[in-house]
Image: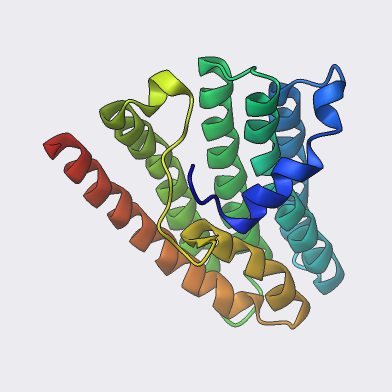
Amino acid sequence: MKHPPWDQRAARYLVRPLARTSITPNQVTIATLLIAVGGAALMAAGRPALLNWGASIFVVARFLDHCDGELARQTNQTSRLGYYLDYFAGMVSYAALFLCIGFGLRNGPLGEWSVAIGGIASAVAIGAFFVNLRIDHAQGGDTTGEAVGYPGFAGFELEDGIYLIAPITWLGWVDWFFAAAGAGAVAHMAWTFFTLVKARRR
């Protein structure tokens, strides 16, 4: 990537010590998945303190998601297994996040609508997994082990918006952020379909 986003650049430096160990990129991916699901599970409790901890842990996991790919490139361990595992971990992480937040916020201003929003957003996250795989296949990314990129500007990608969930949760605005994130998930799915159509036309 000619101009990688800021979080990926940071991950590039942070994983350099790991490149001299026996830790593999796939191990980093699995650890990231467990951290993300653990953070999401805390948010299902719906209690403010656990919401704050869960959001913080999930944000850490999403940053670490860049470390496995960087480690693979620095140690020449890119593989199709790692490629699919990374995609799968991202899908499960986001699906768990939306489901757990929706369940945790059911007694808040959104009421039972939060459960419905969580279910829809989770289904979109799963659907985006398969669509992104087809985009990569159309662009040849599934053979190089490089995942499809996301729209970005000034070193930030669309996906980086998830980092906002931590400070917004700390401020007590997670209900409305969650509603906006659900709408954003649907918009992201529309973007992936549009990208797939363009890739196939090429």
Q: Position of residue 157 (x, y in %)?
A: 50, 59
What is the x, y in percent for residue 112? Answer: 54, 69
The quarter of the picture where residue 27 lies is: top right
Residue 112 seen anywhere in this rendered image of the structure: no
Q: Position of residue 62 (x, y in %)?
A: 67, 50
Q: Please count the marks in the image.
A: 0
Q: Is residue 57 above or below residue 138?
A: below
Percent coordinates x, y for residue 106 in the rendering: 62, 69
Residue 190 left/right relative to 165 = left
Relative horizontal placement of residue 147, taking residue 21 as reference (left or right) = left
Q: Nearer the viewer, residue 20 or 191?
A: 20
- Examine the rendering and report whether any part of residue 76 can be seen: yes
Quadrant in which the C terminus is drawn: top left
Q: Residue at x 86, y 33 (%)?
A: 17
In the depicted structure, whether residue 106 falls above or below residue 142: below
- Foreground pick, 54 / 149: 149
The quarter holding residue 64 reads top right
Question: Residue pushed farthest left?
Answer: 201
Q: Residue at x 43, y 45 (%)?
A: 149
Tell me which residue sits at (87%, 21%) in the image.
Answer: 21
Q: Nearer the viewer, residue 65 or 144?
A: 144
